[in-house]
Each structure stands twice: as C-alpha cells, then as structure tokens.
Amino acid sequence: MPRVKKGAAVRRAKKRVLKAARGFRGARRNQWRTATESVTRAEVNARKSRKVMKREYRGLWILRVNIACRQRGVRYSEFINGCKKAKIALNRKMLSEIAIADPQGFDAIMNEAKAALA
C-alpha cells in the first residue's frame, strides 16, 4: 500500500486549534503543543463554568423568593410546599421575577399557597 500523508487535514486541524488559541498569552498562542493543551483545557473549563453558572443563578432565584416570603411571614420551604399543593407550576426564576416586578401578583400567589397549606 502506498504511504498516505495527511498534509491538508493536519494543516486544517492545526489552523483550527491555533485560531481558537488567539488571545492566549505567550507561547500558548502560537506553539502547537502548548496551544493544543491550552485550548483543550479552556474548552473543559468553559463547559464546567456553564454548569456552575446555571447552579449559581438557581441559588440567586431561591434567595430572592426566600426574601420575598420572609417579608410576608412565611418560610421559603413552606411557600414552595404550598405552591406544589395548590398546583402552581411556576419555576424559581418566574417566582423571583414576579416577586421583584409585581409584588401584588406575588401576594396573590402567596395567599393561594397559604390556603393550600391550611
């Protein structure tokens, strides 16, 4: 069998990695081996950070809803339990937006949750 050289494919792959390494400092931007390591590591960290960001936002929404509940004399866990029993299908993000933008609407949801608990 004849020897196969992967000139064009390798060039394309290297170009893709070095383009992704633009903006990195020092040799990480233009040396092939360090650039591949840096780009791989950056992709891994980017994926992790996307997951962490989702986690942190959920915590922020829960904190906001908790504060709104405490102002109305109810604990967060009781409020969420009441919402589930009253079949109020709003997620934490929407509840926090309502608590900030529409306090009367949040009061109405709170009253329904309290009624479901009693």
Image (spheres, rainbow, N blue to C red):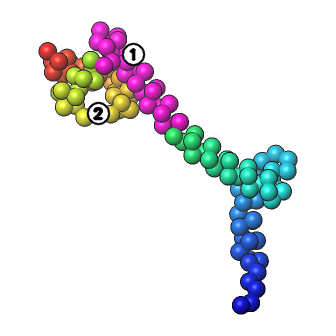
Q: Is residue 83 left or right of residue 22?
A: left
The kind of secondary structure the magenta stretch mainly shows is helix
Question: What kind of residue is marked 1?
Answer: Ile
Q: Is residue 69 left or right of residue 28?
A: left
Q: Residue furthest front?
A: 1
Q: Quadrant of residue 14?
A: bottom right
Q: Secondary structure at mark 2?
A: loop
Q: Measured along the vertical axis of the image, is residue 24 above or below residue 9? A: above
Q: Mark 1 = which residue? A: 67
**Nearer-the-camera pick, 71 or 19:** 19
Magenta span of residues: 52-77
- Residue 90's tag is 2
In the image, what residue occupies the spot 24% across and 23% down? 81
Quadrant where the N terminus sits is: bottom right
Q: Is residue 75 left or right of residue 44?
A: left
Q: Residue furthest bottom?
A: 1
Q: Measured along the vertical axis of the image, is residue 93 above or below residue 33? A: above
Quadrant where the C terminus sits is: top left
- In this rendering, does residue 104 appear at all? no
On whether residue 76 falls in the magenta region, the answer is: yes
